[in-house]
Amino acid sequence: MRFLTRGGRSPKPRASLRRHRAARPLLLGLSLLFVGTLYAALTPAAPSSAEGATDQQLVAQGKNLFAVNCASCHGLNAEGLAQQGAPSLTNVGAAAVDFQVRTGRMPMANPLAQAPRKENVFTDDEIAALAAYVASLGDGPGIPTEDQYNPAGLSPEDVARGGELFRTNCSACHNFKGAGGALPNGLVAPSLQESTPKEVYEALRTGPGQMPVFAAGAVPDDDVKSIIGYLEQVNATPSAGLTLGGLGPVSEGFWAWVVGIGGLVLFAVWIASRGARA
Amino acid sequence: MNDPQTDLPVPDPGLEEHPPRFTDVDDAAADRAYKQIVGMLAAVPVLVVAFLVVYFAVPRDAELVLFGANLKMQTTLLGLTAGVATLLIGISAIHWARMLMSDEEIVGDRHGAASPPEARERVLTDLETGIEASGIRRRKLLGTGMAGALGMMALPAVVSLADMGPWPTAELRAKTIEKTIWAEGVHLVNDVTFTRLKATELVVGQLVNAQPETLQEYHGAALQQQKAKASIIVVRMDPNSIRIPESRRDWQVDGILCYSKICTHVGCPISLWEQQTHHLLCPCHQSTFDLGNSGVVVFGPAARALPQLPITTDAEGYLVARSDFTVPVGPSYFERDSSKDFQEGDR
């Protein structure tokens, strides 16, 4: 307080300002800003000094968020903890963080089960900070820009080729219309019907969980766009009647055997029963 | 141990006691059932009229969302009215039979399955007379000649059926089922797009569904035949996390391994690969192969490891095959030699 009072009396004090009611709070604010800027300018920069000041702040913010939300499983330096089943994040890139956090898969409640899609609890800024921090640790795919994944303007031929690519590369796990499917040991390939184009792009490039990576060396951006275009078209096409999950013969067979044959069995039992007697 | 009285394994339980139905003893109950049946039958004309009204009155493109499903209003209502009407006819008929039709139990005795002795005697006599009259006992060549002639008539059928395809001799098998279009220097290309694969552009954890570049030279049935044998998957794994046997050290490029896509059980194409466990799962019968261990079977009905394709890079770094597969791809067949298949523990 004494310091502030002295500040108020600096070189050419103007009577009106010095006596003004707002002088003290204003000065307090200005000094804090000054100290803060000085601190930010003087603190040691992150190893990759190529990035600008704002990026470094983002990384620093992300590091703090990481320590609070992720480090209990992935380790303080994102080195991973094998006994938690948490992989090292040093080379996963910003796209993996954006995908995992934005879809609510991370942070996960039960470390050994499959991370389910759930409500995301982070703001866009916080996700960007986390992604910037993890990206600063090593190599890895970055967050895609809209022109990399937006399927707008695809020709019907492109969409048809996207369908061919989808059935060749994706349908083994995700089903021919992206409805998802079962994997060994209780795991599932999730449905893609709720996924945004950006999420599909990021999943292809980063290979979350057991999913293989489909990097640009084999599936260039144009092919990814075609695949996304196909998925959008499939999802937009209304199916006639009850889809039964769109899972193919398994769910259809289940209905036919349990509901269809089961109903007939109940009728047969009713027809043959003696009923109540006097 | 048979029952002494009937000479049957279990005693004759006789007829069950037959208590009357409620509708037999209670007129009010019978009236109720009567009204129920007539009520159901009376609903049928109403539903039929509703069907006709829906047919003409409901527009064809009207939509209806029911339990989250997009349905066509008209077809849904047509199905409901006609279906419920049919169901009501059936239910009322059964209800009628159970409640109001006569409930008497009638015993009808079955006769034995065997013919009476005199009929059997007569058949045997007739047969003996017939054989005697045919002269076959005195002139024996008649029977032999007829049997021989009929037997020879089977030969044209056997020969023409056997000639429907080439005999699968060892020589023919080596040229067809045991050979694919993979050969030294054939480039590995993406399925669908047919772009070449550069080793340095594949990352750890990557899966590529691939084909031989020469597949593009085939068309029609030949294309399908070659594709069914030559389809492959290319995976890249961290070389430190997998087991590469000594004999296959130069079959791979920095952890990029290439396997047949055709399951060795009954030949489904498989690309369901888990990048963390390195397991490849066949969706048809759950056979599971460990691609981090030369494709050996870790689960399921497949009996043989997934064949691995030896690969290397060309001068520009693109992936090429070093040779054809060293064992036949796909499911087993009778004459298949399994001695060259990779087995757990091989070096």
Image (cartoon, coloured by chain):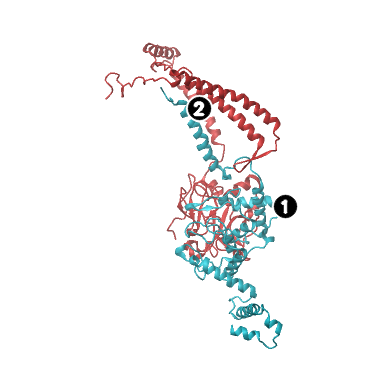
Q: Secondary structure at mark 2?
A: helix
Figure check: A41 above or below A144: below
Residue B311 at x, y = what percent? Answer: 56, 60
**Disc 1 is attached to a residue of which chain?**
A
Question: From mark 1 to mark 2, how far is it between C-alphas?
Answer: 66 Å
Q: Quadrant of the C terminus of chain B?
A: bottom left
Figure check: B197 above or below A255: below
Q: Supply the letter of whichever chain is red.
A: B
The tint of chain A in the picture is cyan
Asked if residue B202 can be seen in this view, the reply is no
Mark 1 residue type: Ser
Estimate how packed mark 2 is, as few (under 14), some (14 to 19) or many (20 or more) residues with alpha carbons within 10 Å. Answer: few
Residue indicated by mark 2: B152
Residue indicated by mark 1: A155
Residue A4 at x, y = what percent? Answer: 61, 83
**Which residue is found at the position 59% from the left and 71% from the top?**
A59
Q: Secondary structure at mark 1?
A: loop
